[in-house]
Amino acid sequence: MLSLTTPPSLLHADPECGHAPRTVRNAAVRALLGELITYPKPGLVSLCDSGSHRDMDAASFVRSSLALRRYFEQAAAAGAQGASFATLNRLGRAAEARMLRATGGVNTHRGAIFNLGLLAAAAGARTPRDRAPLGERVRQLWGADIAAHRRDGGSHGSRVTAAHGAGGAQAEAAAGFPSVYRLALPAYRDALARSGAANAARVQAFFTLMAELADTNLLHRGGAAGLAFAQSAARQFLDAGGVHRSGWQSHAVRVHRQLVERWLSPGGSADLLAACLFVAALEPAR
């Protein structure tokens, strides 16, 4: 049974062993729920409020996360069997349909299905002596196919990519998730080591992503000006000390309210926060 209070170390795989599909499934669901409970998380759904969203709330995110359990296990098993990107893409499409049934047609986790599905497959593909990061394994195994994949031209992400030249989730995955490994994961691990507080570490990782990521969700809702506003607000929070100072919560809440007032939602940063939590659970710190 999954518990939000279970220490993340209990889900860390032995580095001498591969990752069993059920271990991968549990880590992925915990990552989604960990992202959900993170607060303050500007503009996004949490247990406190729905942020800049009228069509979803915390309950819909929980339903969606649980509906995706089987998908993450399937992705890990497929990776262990040497599945192609086309096979993983079919599994993702089926998972997306289950998500929409669980939420009444609301897109809660489309980005996470893509990101965590690939990372779950990479975890399943790991051999007992494999030391490569999961993101690097995604790049090696499927990077070229991810980059060449023609996405649905009617999606928000594809339209924003065409209009603004932002790479989005597709470019991030094809490159091996550099924003996770260079930004979020170091910030998360450092904050966790310094504070011992899991929520503070997640907030620090989230703001680190929001400050740098060309988030296509922000571009979709607010254009270049909306992206610039959110990035500037995140940088100001980090420059003031981030979560490593007293009173950081009130500053983060203020940024949250500013984004809600402008109807901005950094969903790409939220998806990569979940990816960060997944990687942190399955990869030992170096």
Image (cartoon, rainbow, N blue to C red):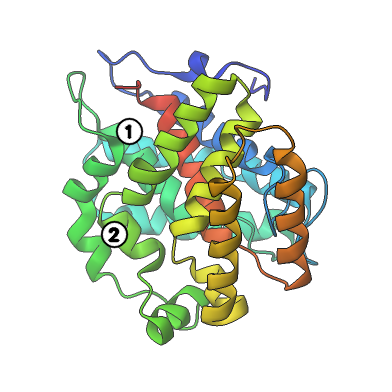
Considering every residue shown, the one lying at the far bottom of the view is 163
Instruction: Tell which of 144 and 160 is nearer to you.
Output: 160
- For the point 46% across and 83% down, which residue is it? 159
Between circles 2 and 1, the one closer to the viewer is 1
Q: Give how far across and how far down residue 229 sits, in percent.
A: 59, 70
SS at badge 1: helix
Q: Which residue is mark 1?
A: 123
Instruction: Tell which of 15 and 197 is nearer to you.
Output: 197
- Asked if residue 177 shows in the view, the reply is no
Q: Which residue is mark 2?
A: 86
* Residue 84 marker: none
Residue 237, placed above or below residue 10: below
Indicate the amino acid at tag 2: Ala
Q: Are marks 2 and 1 in contact (CB under 8 Å)?
A: no
Q: Is residue 175 found left or right of 12 in the rendered image?
A: left
Q: Is residue 266 found left or right of 180 in the rendered image?
A: right
Q: Give how far across and how far down residue 118 sits, in percent.
A: 36, 47
Mark 2, other Cα within 10 Å: few <14 / some 14–19 / many ≥20: few
Indicate the amino acid at tag 1: Ala
Q: Give how far across and how far down residue 33 sits, in percent.
A: 64, 37
Q: Quadrant of the N terminus?
A: top right
SS at badge 2: helix
- Asked if residue 192 shows in the view, the reply is yes
